[in-house]
Amino acid sequence: MEADLKQKLKTLPESPGCYIYRDKKGTILYIGKSKNLKQRVKSYFTKTQIGKTARLVHHIHDFELIITSTEQEALLLEMTLIMKYQPPYNVMLKDEIRYVYLKITNETNPHLETTKEIEKDGASYFGPYASRHTATATQELLQKIYPLCHCNGKRGRPCFYYHLGMCIGPCARDVTKEEYDAQIKKISDFLNGGQKEVKRDIENRMDEQINNLEFERAKETHELLNVLERVTEKQKVMARDFGHRDMIHFAEQDQFCAIQIFFIRNGAIVGRSAKVFEIVGDVTEMVESFVMAFYNHPNHLLPKELLVPERLDTKLMAKALGIKVRVPKNGEKKALSELIHENAKSALDAHFKMLEYAEKTEE
C-alpha cells in the first residue's frame, strides 16, 4: 500500500457517507456507502480479501469521501452516484427484462392500454405482468366489462368497438368525467384484487339477462366468465390477503451472490427478477444498493410493501424507498420467503455449474 493512501486511512471519520475508490488514472472503480466510514473503508485494506474484492483493492490508488447526516442520505447518494458513473466493480442494473404493465391514460377520453414504459404523465399503471399475453388478455377482458375510450374520441359516426360494447362512446355521445371516473374505479378495483366482485357482477348481469329472456346476450356474458377464469387460472395464489407486494431473498457462496425479487399481485406470483453477481465488500451493502437501483429504475413500479430477509436494514430501506419494508416472521409469507431463498440457492448452483462447464470447454 502506498504511503499517501496509508496516511489517508488514519484520518477516516466515524460518520455515515459514501466512499469512492479510484485507480491511478483517476477513474472511478467502486462506490459504496456505510453508516461508519472508518470501519468500512479500513476493512478493505486490513482484512485478507479474495475474488473480486481483492482485484478491486489491488487497483485502488486513491479514495474520496462524501459525509452525510444519515445512512439514509448515504444510500440515496450512493444510488445517484452509481447511476451517474457506472463503476465497473459495482453491481449494475441491466434492463434485460422489460416488464409489461397496464396503463389508464391521463387524458380527456382515457384509454386502457399495455406498455413497457412507465412515464411521469399522470397515468395510472398496474403490474408487472408475467407476459404480454396475460396483460393483453386482461386488457381485452376489462374493455368488454368496463369499457373506456377505444377510438380517437372524436364525435361523429360511432366506432366499430362502440357497437361491440368495448368503447364507452365519446364517438357517439357526450361522456361525462363522472362516467369515466366510475369506470376507472371499477378497473382499478379489479386490478387491485377485486376479481371476486367482478365475477359476482358478471354473474348477476347474466342472471338478469336470462330472466329477461335475452339468451344471446346471456351467452356472451357467460363467455366473459370463461375469459375471466382463463385470465386468473394461471396465477397460483400464495397468500390469502391478496396484497400487492414484492418479496426479496438472496443466497451467497464462494464470493458470489444470487438475488431474487418475486412480484406478488392479488396474492399470486406474477413474475420475478433474478441476478447473480460477484461480491465486492459487504454482501448486504451490495444487495441493498441493488434493490435501491432496481426500484429507482424508471420502468419498475414500487410495490405497496416489500418483504426482505432479516439481514437487510428494513428501517433504512423503508425511509429511502418511501414504502413499508418488513421481515416475514411466520405463516404463508415466511414460507414463501423460504421458497424464494431456495430459488436463490438454485440459481447459485446453476451459476457454478456453468462456470465449471466453461472451464472444461477451455481446457
Image: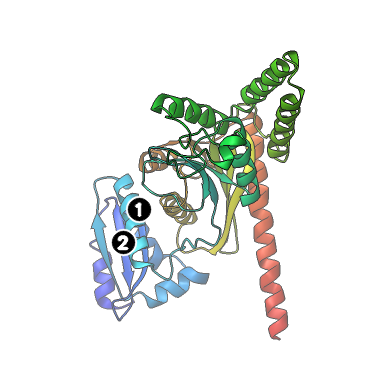
Where residue 64 appears, as percent x and y from the top left, is 26, 65
* Contact, mark 2 vs mark 1 (Cβ under 8 Å): yes
Left or right of residue 286, residue 35 in this image: left
Identity of the residue furthest to the front in this view:
157
Identity of the residue furthest to the top in this view:
211
How packed mark 2 is, by other alpha carbons closer than 10 Å (few <14, some 14-19, many 20 or more), is many
Mark 1 lies on a secondary structure that is: strand
Closest to the observer, 93 or 341? 93
Closest to the observer, 153 or 157? 157
Please tell me whether residue 201 is drawn above or below residue 300 in the rendered image: above
Q: Is residue 319 visible?
A: yes
Where residue 47 appears, as percent x and y from the top left, is 44, 65
How packed mark 1 is, by other alpha carbons closer than 10 Å (few <14, some 14-19, many 20 or more), is many
Where, by quadrant of the figure, is residue 139 drawn? Answer: top right
Where residue 213 appears, as percent x and y from the top left, is 75, 17
Where, by quadrant of the figure, is residue 238 drawn? Answer: top right
Instruction: Residue type at mark 1: give it.
Output: Ser
Q: Which residue is mark 2?
A: 19
Q: Quadrant of the C terminus?
A: bottom right
Please tell me whether residue 30 is drawn above or below residue 150 in the rendered image: below
Q: Is residue 131 visible?
A: no
Please tell me whether residue 76 is drawn above or below residue 56 in the rendered image: above
Query: Residue 324 — which label?
Result: none
Please tell me whether residue 80 is drawn above or below residue 44 in the rendered image: above
Q: Residue at x 62, y 48 (%)?
A: 130
Q: Which residue is mark 1?
A: 34
Q: Residue at x 48, y 34 (%)?
A: 172
Spatial CA span between label 2 and label 1? 8 Å
